[in-house]
Image (cartoon, rainbow, N blue to C red):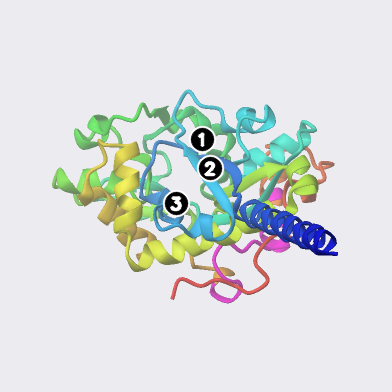
Amino acid sequence: MKNQIKCRTRRMRNTLLLAGLMALGNAHASEELAKVTFGLDWFAKAEHGGFFQAVATGIYEKHGLDVTIEAGGPQVNGMQLLLAGKLDFVMGYPIHNINAVEQGLPVVSVAATFQKDPQVIIMQPGIKSLSELKGGSILVANYADTTFWPWLKKEYGFTDDMKAPFTGSLQPFLSERADAQQGYLTNEPYTIGRAAVDANVILMADEGYPPYAGVIETTREMLNEKPEVVQQFIKASLEGWRSYFKNPKPGNELIQKSNPELTPELIAYSISKMKEYNLIDGGAAQDGGIGTMTHERWEETFDFMVDTGLVNTGVDYRKAYSLEFLPESPIFLE
């Protein structure tokens, strides 16, 4: 009888021990983070601040993600790496996304970092508007031919003989060898201002240039196989932006580790311009929350592309984006 009791007791102990081990294993499994790699569109900068902030402050981990941020650059093709499975998400551009759909590539935008494209035209002090620039000289990079240059031609009558190559150097503009040049609202105007040139800066988005910028892109396979990861990555990234605008110090430390040449002064300037021009929280984001996108805005971008010959009219541009993975409860900066 005693032996039977001992056996039953031993079996109970073993059962409890097994249950405990299983519970411990399940706890560890629940704590496992989904590994995600996110590719930037350029070297690390303040315009990526919310993503670095989400890493630095543990926001991604809170949402079950282990996120690695890969810097971009002139020799990095983020979309190619995304399609090759080297990246899970990339920071892209709607025009390129629609072009990809035309080529049959399964790339989908799921959120927009910038409600306004920060692309600007910087003009000499005596030129006050884009209309006044018509017939003058302007420095633009090659990629302008497939983005904002057709828009300038259509809206302001610019002609190709106005163009000269923009190589990244500001010297032609500073020495007044050009009437204007392209730039990024959060970058070149700062350096030009430090050179004591009181240039006029026009944000093309405020003049009607339609695309979003800094869209978060992934593949259709990712949407189908890991929808919860997509949702959590978007939500955590937007929370990162909210945190970054409150106290950017943690994110800035990671940004400068990735890009040591970036000065604290330029970072502060970039943040101030993102806020001043409502790049992240303007437009539909005022009601829909940051990251939001709308069918109307994508249609407007597609119509512009068709009108300027950047895409064929038969392309189903709606395959280029999805609104299904945006947070159910909008996230606002304040």
Callout 1 crowding tier (Cα within 10 Å): few <14, some 14–19, many ≥20? few
Q: Is residue 160 left or right of residue 126?
A: right
Q: Secondary structure at mark 3?
A: helix
Q: Is residue 149 above or below residue 214?
A: above
- First in sequence, mark 2 or 3: give its number: 3
Q: Residue furthest top?
A: 75
For label 2, the crowd category at 10 Å Cα-Cα, with few meaning under 14, some 14 to 19 and many 20 or more, is some
- Main SS, magenta region, reads helix
Q: Would you say residue 137 sits in the magenta stretch? A: no
Q: Amino acid at mark 2?
A: Phe
Question: Which residue is depicted at the point 40% across and 58% down?
Answer: 57
Residue 114 visible: no
**Label 2's element?**
loop
Given this view, does label 1 or label 3 mark the residue nearer the observer?
3
Which residue is located at x 26 percent, y 34 percent?
A: 170
Given contact means CB atoms under 8 Å apart, are the residues at marks 2 and 1 in contact?
A: yes
Residue beneath disc 1 = 144
Residue 55 tag number: 3
In the picture, residue 31 is in which quadrant? bottom right
